[in-house]
Protein backbone atom coordinates (compact mmCIF):
# COMPACT_ATOMS: atom_id res chain seq x y z
CA UNK A 1 0.00 0.00 0.00
CA UNK A 2 1.68 3.20 -1.15
CA UNK A 3 -1.06 5.38 0.30
CA UNK A 4 -1.29 8.69 -1.53
CA UNK A 5 0.62 7.44 -4.58
CA UNK A 6 -0.12 8.32 -8.17
CA UNK A 7 0.00 5.47 -10.66
CA UNK A 8 0.36 6.18 -14.37
CA UNK A 9 0.30 3.14 -16.59
CA UNK A 10 -1.92 2.68 -19.62
CA UNK A 11 -4.34 -0.26 -19.51
CA UNK A 12 -3.30 -1.33 -16.01
CA UNK A 13 -6.61 -2.06 -14.36
CA UNK A 14 -5.93 -1.27 -10.70
CA UNK A 15 -9.40 0.17 -10.24
CA UNK A 16 -12.10 -0.79 -12.69
CA UNK A 17 -13.91 2.49 -11.93
CA UNK A 18 -11.02 4.64 -13.20
CA UNK A 19 -10.86 5.97 -16.73
CA UNK A 20 -7.29 5.01 -17.71
CA UNK A 21 -7.66 6.75 -21.08
CA UNK A 22 -7.97 10.16 -19.42
CA UNK A 23 -4.33 10.99 -18.82
CA UNK A 24 -3.24 14.42 -17.55
CA UNK A 25 -1.84 17.15 -19.74
CA UNK A 26 1.90 17.75 -19.50
CA UNK A 27 1.40 20.71 -17.15
CA UNK A 28 -0.95 18.63 -14.94
CA UNK A 29 1.59 15.80 -14.90
CA UNK A 30 4.43 18.13 -13.90
CA UNK A 31 2.27 19.54 -11.10
CA UNK A 32 1.74 15.99 -9.83
CA UNK A 33 5.52 15.50 -9.76
CA UNK A 34 5.97 18.83 -7.94
CA UNK A 35 3.45 17.64 -5.34
CA UNK A 36 5.48 14.43 -4.75
CA UNK A 37 8.65 13.64 -2.81
CA UNK A 38 9.56 10.32 -4.48
CA UNK A 39 9.19 9.30 -8.12
CA UNK A 40 9.10 5.59 -8.80
CA UNK A 41 10.00 5.28 -12.47
CA UNK A 42 9.68 2.09 -14.51
CA UNK A 43 11.55 2.47 -17.77
CA UNK A 44 10.91 0.20 -20.73
CA UNK A 45 13.59 -2.42 -21.33
CA UNK A 46 13.59 -3.13 -25.08
CA UNK A 47 16.10 -4.97 -27.16
CA UNK A 48 15.72 -2.64 -30.12
CA UNK A 49 16.62 -3.86 -33.62
CA UNK A 50 19.86 -2.56 -35.09
CA UNK A 51 20.86 -3.48 -38.64
CA UNK A 52 18.23 -6.22 -38.67
CA UNK A 53 19.53 -7.67 -35.40
CA UNK A 54 18.43 -7.20 -31.83
CA UNK A 55 20.82 -5.52 -29.41
CA UNK A 56 22.99 -7.91 -27.48
CA UNK A 57 23.04 -7.92 -23.68
CA UNK A 58 26.44 -6.20 -23.83
CA UNK A 59 25.04 -3.37 -25.98
CA UNK A 60 22.03 -3.00 -23.66
CA UNK A 61 24.35 -2.73 -20.66
CA UNK A 62 26.38 0.04 -22.34
CA UNK A 63 23.44 2.18 -23.44
CA UNK A 64 20.28 1.50 -21.46
CA UNK A 65 17.11 3.10 -22.74
CA UNK A 66 15.52 5.90 -20.71
CA UNK A 67 12.73 8.37 -21.37
CA UNK A 68 11.07 11.58 -20.26
CA UNK A 69 9.80 9.66 -17.22
CA UNK A 70 13.28 9.74 -15.68
CA UNK A 71 14.05 13.26 -16.89
CA UNK A 72 10.85 14.68 -15.37
CA UNK A 73 11.59 12.86 -12.11
CA UNK A 74 15.04 14.49 -11.94
CA UNK A 75 13.90 17.95 -13.11
CA UNK A 76 10.85 18.21 -10.86
CA UNK A 77 12.79 17.92 -7.61
CA UNK A 78 11.72 14.45 -6.54
CA UNK A 79 13.88 11.59 -5.29
CA UNK A 80 13.87 9.15 -8.24
CA UNK A 81 13.88 5.39 -7.72
CA UNK A 82 14.33 3.88 -11.18
CA UNK A 83 13.66 0.40 -12.53
CA UNK A 84 14.87 -0.32 -16.05
CA UNK A 85 17.45 -1.91 -18.28
CA UNK A 86 20.73 -3.26 -16.88
CA UNK A 87 23.03 -0.49 -15.69
CA UNK A 88 20.52 2.35 -16.10
CA UNK A 89 21.16 3.55 -12.54
CA UNK A 90 24.93 3.13 -12.99
CA UNK A 91 24.78 5.24 -16.15
CA UNK A 92 22.86 8.00 -14.34
CA UNK A 93 25.34 7.86 -11.44
CA UNK A 94 28.32 7.96 -13.83
CA UNK A 95 27.23 11.35 -15.18
CA UNK A 96 26.64 12.69 -11.67
CA UNK A 97 22.92 12.10 -11.15
CA UNK A 98 21.74 10.69 -7.84
CA UNK A 99 18.98 8.12 -7.52
CA UNK A 100 17.62 6.70 -4.29
CA UNK A 101 17.82 3.07 -5.45
CA UNK A 102 20.80 2.26 -3.22
CA UNK A 103 19.33 4.16 -0.27
CA UNK A 104 16.28 1.87 -0.31
CA UNK A 105 18.39 -1.27 -0.87
CA UNK A 106 17.81 -2.01 -4.55
CA UNK A 107 20.23 -4.75 -5.62
CA UNK A 108 18.81 -5.23 -9.10
CA UNK A 109 21.51 -3.78 -11.31
CA UNK A 110 23.36 -7.10 -11.52
CA UNK A 111 20.42 -9.47 -11.05
CA UNK A 112 18.41 -11.49 -13.56
CA UNK A 113 14.88 -10.27 -14.26
CA UNK A 114 12.94 -12.31 -11.68
CA UNK A 115 15.39 -11.47 -8.88
CA UNK A 116 15.58 -7.87 -10.08
CA UNK A 117 11.79 -7.56 -9.85
CA UNK A 118 11.83 -9.09 -6.35
CA UNK A 119 14.48 -6.59 -5.25
CA UNK A 120 12.41 -3.70 -6.63
CA UNK A 121 9.32 -5.01 -4.82
CA UNK A 122 11.32 -4.94 -1.58
CA UNK A 123 12.22 -1.30 -2.31
CA UNK A 124 8.53 -0.47 -2.84
CA UNK A 125 7.70 -2.18 0.46
CA UNK A 126 10.35 -0.12 2.29
CA UNK A 127 9.00 3.08 0.78
CA UNK A 128 5.40 2.18 1.61
CA UNK A 129 6.34 1.63 5.26
CA UNK A 130 7.53 5.24 5.62
CA UNK A 131 5.23 7.90 7.01
CA UNK A 132 4.75 11.15 5.11
CA UNK A 133 6.80 12.92 7.79
CA UNK A 134 9.67 10.44 7.35
CA UNK A 135 9.65 10.94 3.57
CA UNK A 136 9.53 14.72 3.95
CA UNK A 137 12.48 14.58 6.38
CA UNK A 138 14.46 12.43 3.91
CA UNK A 139 13.68 14.92 1.12
CA UNK A 140 14.82 17.89 3.25
CA UNK A 141 18.03 16.06 4.23
CA UNK A 142 18.78 15.43 0.54
CA UNK A 143 17.92 18.82 -0.95
CA UNK A 144 21.55 19.29 -2.04
CA UNK A 145 21.46 16.07 -4.13
CA UNK A 146 18.03 16.93 -5.50
CA UNK A 147 19.20 20.42 -6.52
CA UNK A 148 22.35 18.95 -8.07
CA UNK A 149 20.17 16.62 -10.20
CA UNK A 150 18.06 19.58 -11.35
CA UNK A 151 21.16 21.62 -12.19
CA UNK A 152 22.87 18.81 -14.10
CA UNK A 153 19.82 17.88 -16.20
CA UNK A 154 19.15 21.58 -16.88
CA UNK A 155 22.73 22.07 -18.07
CA UNK A 156 22.55 19.01 -20.31
CA UNK A 157 19.19 20.08 -21.77
CA UNK A 158 20.37 23.65 -22.37
CA UNK A 159 23.85 22.80 -23.69
CA UNK A 160 23.31 24.65 -26.96
CA UNK A 161 22.21 27.81 -25.23
CA UNK A 162 24.81 27.99 -22.44
CA UNK A 163 27.88 26.73 -24.33
CA UNK A 164 29.48 29.57 -26.27
CA UNK A 165 31.68 27.10 -28.21
CA UNK A 166 28.65 25.23 -29.58
CA UNK A 167 28.61 24.97 -33.39
CA UNK A 168 25.15 24.83 -34.92
CA UNK A 169 24.27 21.71 -36.95
CA UNK A 170 24.69 21.92 -40.73
CA UNK A 171 21.50 20.00 -41.40
CA UNK A 172 17.94 20.25 -40.10
CA UNK A 173 17.62 16.45 -39.82
Image (tube, rainbow, N blue to C red):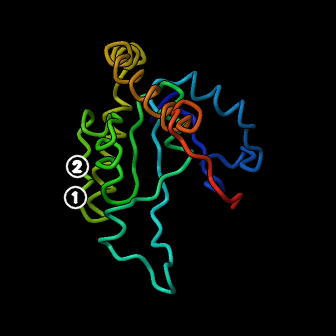
Is residue 132 or residue 160 the one in the foreground? 160
Secondary element at image label 1: helix
Horizontal relation, residue 31 to residue 128: left or right: right
Which quadrant is home to the N terminus?
Answer: top left
Label disc, if present, on residue 110 of the rendered structure? 1
Horizontal and vertical percent for residue 73?
50, 35
Above or below for 78 versus 171: above
For the residues labelled 2 and 1, the Cα–Cα distance comes to 7 Å
Name the image quarter holding residue 134. Answer: top left
Is residue 171 or residue 17 the one in the foreground? 171
Name the image quarter holding residue 125. Answer: top left
Label 2: how many Cα within 10 Å (few below 14, some 14–19, many 20+): some
Q: Residue at x 37, y 40 (%)?
A: 124
Label disc, if present, on residue 107 of the rendered structure? 2
Horizontal relation, residue 100 to residue 71: left or right: left
Secondary element at image label 2: loop
Amino acid sequence: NLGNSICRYAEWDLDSNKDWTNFPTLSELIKEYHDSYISIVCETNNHLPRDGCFLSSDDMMKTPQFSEKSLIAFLSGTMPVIFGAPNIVKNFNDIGLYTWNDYFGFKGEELYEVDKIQSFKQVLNKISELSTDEVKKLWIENKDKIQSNINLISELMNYRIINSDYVAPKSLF
